[in-house]
Image (cartoon, rainbow, N blue to C red):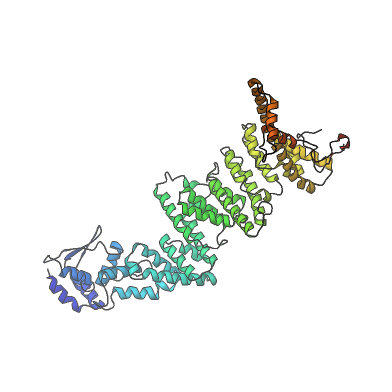
Amino acid sequence: MFHRAYIVKKFNSYDDDLACALFYRIFSQDIPADVVVEVGEANFSLHKFMLVAKSNRIRQLILESAEPDLTRIDLSNIPGGPETFEKAAKFCYGVNFEITVHNVAALRCAAEYLQMTDKYCDNNLTGRTEDFLTQVALSSLSGAIVVLKSCEDLTPIAEELKIVQRCVEVVTSKVTIEANFPSRSPTNWWTEELSILDIDFFGRVITSMKQRASKTLTVSSAIVTYAERWLRDLIRDHSGAGTKSLESDDSDIRIRQRELIQSIVPLLPSEKAALPINFICCLLRSATFVKASTATKNELEKRISAILEHVTVDDLLVLSFSYDGERLFDLESVRRIISGFAEREKSVAVFNAGDFREVCSAAMLRVAKIVDAYLGEIATCTELSISKFNGIAVLIPKGARKVDDDLYRAVDIYLKSHPNLDEIEREKVCSVMDALKLSYEARLHASQNKRLPVQIVLHALYFDQLKLRSGEDEDDMQMDAVSTRNQVQADVSLAKENEALRTELLKMKMYISDIKKTGSGVGASAATTSSGKGGGPRKPTFFSSVSKKLGKLNPFKNGSKDTLNIDDCVDVTKPRRRRFSIS
């Protein structure tokens, strides 16, 4: 057995690879191994004099060991593990092996860990791996991506050696060139290769692309491909087959998917039209399904709300139904999306000094049609409550619907799918639409619809009766619908005043009865009232207040009291107050 000091001194002269290889071929078979190197669970029986010739770290471990003859060395922390150490040991023995884009990063980190630099041996492993990185691995986009992928298990030493940074810069530069000047087909081939990266390194590439002002389409293409690869069961597979295996929210798969979504959303380009609408909707449903953070879901909802006029009914249904399409999944997101769009439109109208209730933008008109059609699709769900149905319908301002035919269709479908509703509940459902804004065909259908409450049918019949009597066009009648509705509201107000009057008359009758019981005459009260005429403003009495209310109901207050002057004809433009009936 050689003494360790002798070994170090003896083999300081064996710096040449050829000499080491020659020595190994001649003597390694005859000289037994004198050291065991432990790397994790793997053990390597080697020769000290071959290792110390090129590894300063092993040399220092032998020299600084308290044992006079060190027989075991633990190198479990070497980057790349046993496989990489085996290649480094072969390099020390002069045995040929292949350096590739898959192992060059691990070999470079292992060489740094073992201190196999040119300082201790010319043309050592550090120099060999650096040459390969520069001249081969980082000369192509595919090679740089593979090297970057291999660095995922080599942190933090790969970061310290700037391997990760160099790979990110090369990938960013070559992706930009490839996106502008494709070298092969399909033109987006690079997105598939980029999607092999871990989300952390992928995020660094995307951030670098944004900093270099890469095109938005280039960035969005990479993100969409990446999300579809790693969230295939949630985004691309709409059958829901991939979600049945997720037993709980704490499963490893669910946690991994949640982390991915929460990492992908901050990478999305800020431009409104940067990503496909359907992709954002699928991403939001996935975020809701895996119970991602509120901030993540809010960001996706804002993005959809900003382009809601371009959303289709199918896109909204993606958000609403479960993956199997059999049950409602999430209506709150849809409600917040529509509400956010309506609030923004209202702010724009106020800024432009317009009335949001009367004048709506073209985008708002399109959204109104989309929402009404959407309500018609979800109305068939038996678990959809009246409050949720109405809650979505009322988000659209009344001015955004020129006619309520689409909304009437949704209401009719809801009533048909919920046959057990009573009269009051049916009236609540119908309260979201205006029967006076239905087209002739819709009114004709409504007048024969037994599912509608009686009040809605009467409204439709009254409007048609008014149209027949006046002989006006449909457009003119739509304008008269507003005045008719105001008249109905006035009737309700008058009925309230009549009720108040009855109450006061009852109080007066009780007051007179009390006076008779106490023996006080009404004349005494009148004398007291007359004596106070000269002194200051007269305090209103109970009788005077009743007289004022009766005066309001006087039909001849502003006109002649001669009933002979009353014209028998009826002004059809302002019909008399009557019940909704056909005469």
Query: How many badges with numbers are in the image?
Result: 0
- The x, y position of residue 495, in whole percent, is 70, 34
Looking at the picture, tell me which residue is in the foreground, 242 or 542: 542
- Which residue is painted at 57% across and 53% down in the image? 340
- Which residue is painted at 48% across and 71% down in the image? 212
The quadrant where residue 153 appears: bottom left
Q: Quadrant of the C terminus?
A: top right
The answer to whether residue 511 of the structure is visible from this angle is yes
- Which residue is painted at 49% across and 69% down in the image? 175
- The x, y position of residue 517, in whole percent, is 64, 20
Q: Is residue 177 left or right of residue 254?
A: right
- The x, y position of residue 561, in whole percent, is 84, 36
In the image, residue 335 sits, relative to residue 215, either above or below, namely above
The quadrant where residue 16 appears: bottom left
Q: Is residue 75 left or right of residue 365?
A: left
Looking at the picture, tell me which residue is in the foreground, 315 or 127: 315
- The x, y position of residue 7, in whole percent, is 15, 73
Q: Quadrant of the N terminus?
A: bottom left
The answer to whether residue 100 of the structure is visible from this angle is no
Q: Is residue 40 left or right of residue 372?
A: left
Q: Is residue 82 left or right of residue 297?
A: left
Looking at the picture, tell me which residue is in the foreground, 68 or 305: 305
In the image, residue 173 sits, relative to residue 539, either above or below, namely below
